[in-house]
Structures are given as C-alpha cells and as structure tokens.
Amino acid sequence: MQTIRISTVLVVLTVLLAGCSGGGVTDGAPSTDSTETDADDTEANADDTETDASATGSDDLSLSAADENLRAAGSFTTQWSYTVQDVDGSTIRFNNTYEVDLDAERSREVYATSGPEAATDYEIFVADGASYTRYGSGADAFYQTSDQAPSVFDSATGRAAGFYNYLEEDAEFVGTETYDGVTVSRYDYSDADAWQTYNQGATSTMFGGDEEVTITDFSISVLVDGNGVARLTTWTLTGETADGDPASVEWSYSITDIGSTSVEDPAWLDEAQ
C-alpha cells in the first residue's frame, strides 16, 4: 500500500464528510459565479457513442482521459448521494442529480436532503445564458434568476474530484462487469486501519457527535469504462462506539446516459420567469 498517497485520499474524504454533514447546503449550493470551461474548448477524438465502449481489464487504473471523453460525448447525467447513520441512530441523506447537455448549453441540478438536519432543497435550471433557481416546494417555493455562463461541466463532475489521481496506484483490479449497459473494469481498495490512523480526531465529528468511533471497515470501489470514465464510484465507512452502537457513512457518485442526456424545461420555469 502506498501510505502517503492513500493518506491524502483519506484526508480529502474527511473534508467531503465534514462539509456535507454540517446541516446546510454545502459545495452543491447555487452560485452565480461560473469558472467552468466551455465544452467547445476541448477537442477529443473519443468515440461519443459511449455505450459501445468496453473495459480493457487492465491492472492499471487510469482516469486521465475521463474529462476529455465526457466533453466529447456532449451530454451526461451525474448522481451523487451521501448517507450518514450517526451514533444516535439518526439517518441523514443528501442527494444531488445533475443533467448536462453541453451541446445545447443546458443543465438541470436537483439537490435534496432528508433527516434531522435537512437543509432547504433546491433546483437549478440553466438555459439560453440564464440561470433559474427554485428553493423549497409547494406554497413555500421561491425563485431566483440571474445571468449565468451556460457551461457547468466542473460543477457537475466536481463531487468526485480530489482523490482519483491518488487512488489510481492503490486500487486493485478485480474483474469486469456490466454497468449502465457498458462493460466496466472494477477496482477496489480497502483499509480500515489506514482510515483510523490518518483521521483520528475527525472520526467522531463525521458521525454526528463527540463520542469516539472505532472504524471497522473502509472500502472504495470504482467501475471504469473503456474510455477511462469512472461510471460508478462508491465508498463505505463503518464503525462502532465504545458501547457497541453502529455508525456508518455511504457515498456514491455515478455518471450515466453519456451522449444521450437531454435537459427538459422544468414545470416551474414559467413561474420563475
């Protein structure tokens, strides 16, 4: 195991956990400042019919061409979820879905939370150079509109950024399987001792309290298609308190419908306008 690299992975994941479990809209919050690069800025020779791709089954995990191939495909959907079962037995869930059509310069993001610390849900629709945000639902819904650069590539793919490059040399090739109609290579990594060593002091905060939690399992799995795109990334962290009470965190991030995602107008668009 490359302890220096994997320790960085663990620190990155610790930051993600701390940001997401704070009870408010975190790095998925709406922003009118766009620093994303337009899809036309990148030229790729990749086949944009992603469903025809097949995994190579290589022992070496490489995701260096992932962004290039996603841009070349023109559209995709990402889905991120994060679930915490804290030391008190409560369950908190965060879900974020992003539909992106780079060619049409349209996107739709839906963010929802549930549990005792649930934050305000929101939905963002971007089209024709404008951004429309809907907060809440039903009679409590309210809207915000603003000018917005149309490309949201970095926002849509940012949930999994930060640790792939460190994971590439540590994860082990397991075999091939099918995901979203595509043959993918599976890479796994597991080391509970590494998490416990490098994250002492942060572990109890992740599980929603001050009680010390001993980590019993930490594992990461990545499913990679033939174009080097991580179609599904999951990691699971489980532990228990000194009294034997269980606690866990589950995180997943998927990229689907590559090259076939279309973004429709939301039903509330007229009201927002």
Image: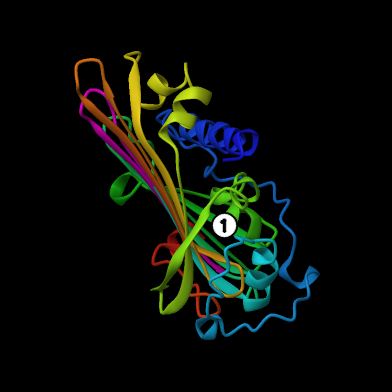
Q: Is 12 above or below relative to 245?
A: below
Residue 98 seen in this snapshot: no
Picture coordinates of residue 231, whole percent (x, y): 49, 65
The reply to whether residue 240 is visible in this rendering is yes
SS majority, magenta = strand
Look at the image and give the residue range highlighted in magenta: 82-100
Name above or below for residue 256 compared with residue 243. below
Q: Nearer the viewer, residue 94 or 103?
A: 94
User: Left of 260 or right of it: where is 61?
Assistant: right
Q: Position of residue 134 (x, y in %)?
A: 45, 51
Residue 15 appears at what percent x and percent y?
A: 54, 31
Residue 92 lies left or right of residue 257; in this view the side is left
Residue position for label 1? 156
Name the spot of residue 186 as percent of width and height, x first. Answer: 46, 63
Q: How is the model colour-coded?
A: rainbow
What amino acid type is highlighted by mark number 1? Ala
Residue drawn 48% across and 71% down?
184
